[in-house]
Image: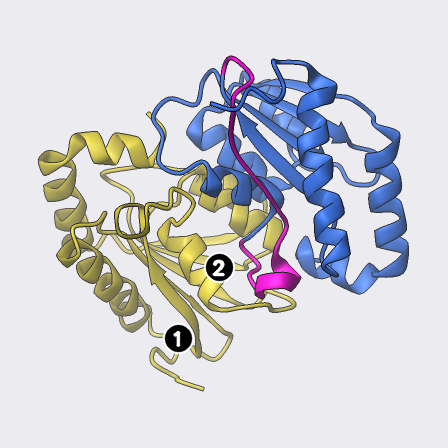
Chain colours: A blue, B yellow
Amino acid sequence: MTRTAERDPAAMLAVAVQEARAGLAEGGIPIGAALFGPEGDLLGNGRNRRVQDGDPSAHAETSAFRAAGRLRGYGRTTMVTTLSPCWYCSGLVRQFGIGHVLIGEARTFLGGHRWLTRHGVRVSVLDDAECVALMRDFVEARPDLWSEDIGR
Amino acid sequence: MTRTAERDPAAMLAVAVQEARAGLAEGGIPIGAALFGPEGDLLGNGRNRRVQDGDPSAHAETSAFRAAGRLRGYGRTTMVTTLSPCWYCSGLVRQFGIGHVLIGEARTFLGGHRWLTRHGVRVSVLDDAECVALMRDFVEARPDLWSEDIGR
């Protein structure tokens, strides 16, 4: 068990940011995510892979969820993501009962995280400057790709 | 372009049912889906692959969406699924603006399809006897696996 984060929000977010940076370096969409267990144990991490794999279903959160493999009981897990989760990823959180969503920023995009709050999910927004900068620069540079990724 | 269905609901559903049957034969969860274009052209099809690939993110609808590859503008597409889409798959439909969801049955499981209706998605439920039987038999035989797949 890798206890990367020990439930420290900044340390948990750092894992997702590292994924986002790696995605950017690959020419992809710079959004990263990680799923942590109750003790801050890293269960899975991943990034948006639309460009890299030609896979429109590979959002950061779904990639992290996939990487964690088959599990039972997500109630005590935390999904950390650099960006407010879109409806697709919010639906994932609700369906599987992920208990906590820790969000890097919700300035450049607002997905379904308020809806999740109404359905009993604990949601924390860190308003992290690096997460904002990553997305702001990316959306400015590649508005077409960003629109594609969120179905606009 | 394979015009399997020519917009005939029963023919479109048959593609998803074939996927569900194939999944069952593989020891998997018998849910299938397919994404069709405006003229009934098959864009992608797939099935639940939790068991086959050890991939909890591979629901039938997300598999079909993935198989269709990178696209722009889902407004005139139809997602056909043998079972009412869970919140995860309903979120996919909403985020990408898929215009129409054609559902085999909603008796054994009710996901988010009424929510989709409220958000402007056209939803049709065929109440197909084979789809009901596939799921009813499966849930009876493997309640543990079904619970796992929907995060219970």
Q: How many marks?
A: 2
Image coords of residue A117 (percent x, y): 62, 20
Can residue A84 be seen?
Answer: no
Q: Is residue B151 above or below residue B20?
A: above
The quarter of the picture where the C terminus of chain A appears is: bottom right
For mark 1, name the chain.
Answer: B
Image disc number at residue B7: 1
Pick the residue in front: A70 or A118.
A70
- Compute the Cα span from label 2 to label 1: 12 Å
Circle 2 residues within 10 Å: few <14, some 14–19, many ≥20: many
Range covered by the magenta-colored residues: A38-57
Circle 1 residues within 10 Å: few <14, some 14–19, many ≥20: some
Can residue B1 be seen?
Answer: yes
* Image-based side of A16 in relation to A127, left or right: left
Which tag, 2 or 1, sits closer to the chain's start? 1
What residue sits 68% from the left and 53% below the top?
Answer: A150
Image coords of residue B22 (percent x, y): 19, 62
For mark 2, name the chain.
Answer: B
- Amino acid at dot 2: His
* Image-based side of A126 in relation to B15, left or right: right
What residue sits 72% from the left and 29% below the top?
Answer: A14
Q: Where is mark 2, residue-wise?
A: B100
What residue sits 49% from the left and 74% below the top?
Answer: B37
* Image-based side of B45 in relation to A86, left or right: left
